[in-house]
Amino acid sequence: MSQLSVRKREGRLSSETVAALNSDLAARFGNRFTASEAIRKAHGHTLTWLENEPPDAVVFAESRDDVIDLVKLCARHDAPVVPFGVGTSLEGHVNAPHGGVSLDLTRMNAVTAVNADDLDCVVEPGVTRKQLNEHLRDSGLFFPIDPGADASLGGMAATRASGTNAVRYGTMKDVVLSLGVVVADGSFLRTGTRAKKSSAGYDLTHLFIGSEGTLGAIVEITLRLSGIPEAIAAGTCSFPDVRSACETTIETIQSGLPIARVELVDALSVRAFNTYSKLALPEQPMLMVEFHGTEASVAEQARRFGEIAAGHGAGPFASATRPEERSKLWQARHDTYWAQMTLRPGARPFATDACVPISRLADCVDETLADIERSGLVAPIVGHVGDGNFHVSPLIDMENPAEIDAAEGFTARLAHRAIAMGGTCTGEHGVGQKKRAYMDEEHGAIALDLMRRVKASFDPTNLFNPGKVFYA
Amino acid sequence: MSQLSVRKREGRLSSETVAALNSDLAARFGNRFTASEAIRKAHGHTLTWLENEPPDAVVFAESRDDVIDLVKLCARHDAPVVPFGVGTSLEGHVNAPHGGVSLDLTRMNAVTAVNADDLDCVVEPGVTRKQLNEHLRDSGLFFPIDPGADASLGGMAATRASGTNAVRYGTMKDVVLSLGVVVADGSFLRTGTRAKKSSAGYDLTHLFIGSEGTLGAIVEITLRLSGIPEAIAAGTCSFPDVRSACETTIETIQSGLPIARVELVDALSVRAFNTYSKLALPEQPMLMVEFHGTEASVAEQARRFGEIAAGHGAGPFASATRPEERSKLWQARHDTYWAQMTLRPGARPFATDACVPISRLADCVDETLADIERSGLVAPIVGHVGDGNFHVSPLIDMENPAEIDAAEGFTARLAHRAIAMGGTCTGEHGVGQKKRAYMDEEHGAIALDLMRRVKASFDPTNLFNPGKVFYA
């Protein structure tokens, strides 16, 4: 095919360009523009262990027109635009290796419309998932995608996020009906309608979902909502080893049981939960599960799950329906990142994730545990195992280059292992900066070339979030 | 943005080009190549009322390598490639307005793998949905997407097909995990892995789904399967008018009842069913419904649905669980196209579809009925109303230009009406040739420009299915 490649950016903007850019930004955005070092660093800094690469400026957008003007202004100065939600990404998505402007969207946080009759809503990108659920509280509806962190919905769409409920409710790819996007020439478009399905043309919605801000800035999201189930039950169940927990998960999924959450927590992470959340769970591998449905169906699901777990040597399974008990349990799960840090004070988590076909899950986790042992790492595992997706967080002394090397080697081996098993180097964290290294192996040269063609044809100057998803 | 537009093709290939092309095709494909007029016409001819535009040749591919060689050979002669499944599309997708080769994929009909543990399978594009379900018969699994016609799975992926089960099981966009595609330079790629989810890069899978053969030829499909439900119940329910049937549907969906099928059949279509399938249904608007689940849940769903329907003035609702009764009912629904033709012997159906947010469904169908009345058309309506999707088939005397004009006017007004209500000009039929006219109105110039950029960057010479999806 003809050459159509992504323009490569080298280094950062010159100080002259930054001065001219910032002068124009100040004129247009007043005190919603800042070049303060602390704020710039806070916009490069995320939960990642990756080096902080701050932007040259931060602009707090308050409207679609702000975004349009910012994009045009940056295009004029050939300065990168890096969309920023709340900064909870783990793969360096909001770093600015080539400088430019961090487009902070947190002030665009209006829930524009709730169409209860159609089970959908329209939000601005800075609305967080908790904020949306708070807004929906009395409607009988909820937004089910829950990556743990109280992420912005724009960021979740941009990284194709999922989380604990995905086994039943899907990922962002399943709940976004349409996106409003500002593209490289400052034009605004909507990628779809509010109809539940359509066969009218190419699927731009899914093209922007997971594009990590490299194709445009998401400024509006139409989301499908779900009815709050009549009954919810949750519980935990301990296992003699990780394999039996994985095998319980596999059998549960294969049996068609419509489980709403099934989370693996390894013994190390259970210990961390006990310390951080003041729980007294047995320090063995554990599954945390949740069932949604009618009273009768939830009871039936819990009973069937208990039988499957018992068949794999699990301890007794008891489920709780009281909201306070359930909240305490899931809060502990959501605090995993912070809890795991108690396992080695002062160390940083090298958080990574992988996802394999569920038939390979037990093998993949087992091999990963053996690798952790061989590598001498402290590396707790948790996972949304109903999807075949799990997380490993080696806890690393960042002053010790040998440890960093060991963690990088481990992370790379995990990516190769998942890909070799027919899976992916990231189930939900995204590619960002470091996982660009596995894109060729996972997708092959032809598919990766097509992705680059999309990028080159939508964003010919590589304005949007350069240095992410693939090497230019 | 810079210019990047789809190359426009004019007219058909010259007779010299066709002669040289066919000579090369004969040399490579032997008796799997034909230029027979009857076979060429059969490959342009589909169920559509649109004029037959036959290809210059037909090649019956038997392997991925056949497809690769064909694409390279066509590229050398600058001759279009028009992928062909079983020819059940309704919008002229397989017509060859610029000539070239119809790539018949029916012989690539192997079920390559069934991974029961992962609830997925891999098929060649010529496998039909019924063939797949036959193959899966003893596995406890089934493939739920059911557009009525026994379409090929390649064609269904290419048109983002759905059908009667979509309200519960989704559309092709929800069940395709990965595609194997041959693109314009003859390269083969896979768009994804068998992992249930991934955040690794742009979503090429969804980009090819619904691209109607304009971006490449689908030669392999990885599909998610579902467990056969323990119990199934189906039934019909008559209503005083179409609005009350629509309102029953809306209330059912909004209540969160996990109905598996909910089909509207208007009084005219009921009459056609009675004639064609020898049934004795009351000739009133009707809903045909189906429930999947455990014995208890199916009974509960049927009871709740009956209550909702009664609240909208419906006649008694009885559900049948015997497979023979259910089959007879759904066979009648699937024969709609043929049954409707009995309403006006000799006339052709101008089949069209539209889809709106479900809150607007009753309004849209009501306005459409009034339009039918005003236009003096015989135009039965059926629909997958749980998705807000419905079909209208004006029965037209093709010898009468005034009738054709009336049908075209009606079809255009329906598209405009659906778009104005926040919906789409096609929920599942696809764009093909005639619905290109509404793409600008539905998507806007910016989104349509991005679609054209994708096409231009993947297929710069407009080799694949030119003249479909959008005007060049």
Image: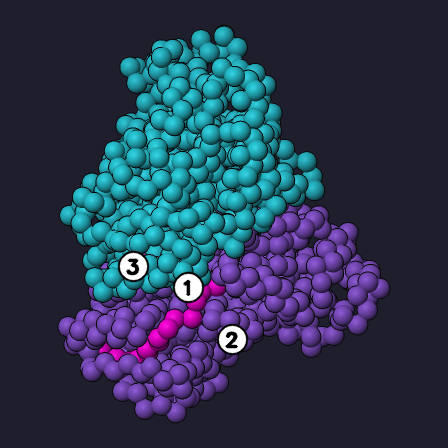
Chain colours: A cyan, B purple
Camera-side residue: B16 or B268? Answer: B268
State the residue position of label 3.
A302
Q: Is residue B165 visible?
A: yes
Q: Chain of mark 1?
A: A
Q: Chain of mark 2?
A: B
The picture places residue A372, in percent across and down from the top left corner, at 53, 34
Residue B395 relative to residue A375: left or right: left
Residue drawn at 51 percent across, 75 percent down: B137
Q: Nearer the viewer, mark 1 or mark 2?
A: 1
Q: Amino acid at mark 3?
A: Ala
What is the distance, in whole Å, between disc 1 and disc 3 at their CAs? 13 Å
Q: Is A211 situated above or below A305?
A: above
Q: Is B247 situated above or below A401?
A: below
**Crowding near the residue tagged with mark 2, few <14, some 14–19, many ≥20 C-alpha atoms within 10 Å:** few
Q: Secondary structure at mark 1?
A: loop
**Magenta residues (range):** B225-241
State the residue position of label 1.
A255
Q: Secondary structure at mark 2?
A: loop
Q: Is B351 situated above or below B435?
A: below
Residue B137, disc:
2
The picture places residue B70, in percent across and down from the top left corner, at 74, 58
Q: Are marks 3 and 2 in contact (CB under 8 Å)?
A: no
The picture places residue A68, in percent across and down from the top left corner, at 38, 29
Q: Nearer the viewer, mark 3 or mark 2?
A: 3
Magenta stretch holds residue A428: no
Disc 1 and disc 3 on one polypeptide chain: yes
Q: Amino acid at mark 1?
A: Ser
Camera-side residue: A134 or B402? Answer: A134
Residue drawn at 62 percent across, 54 percent down: B180
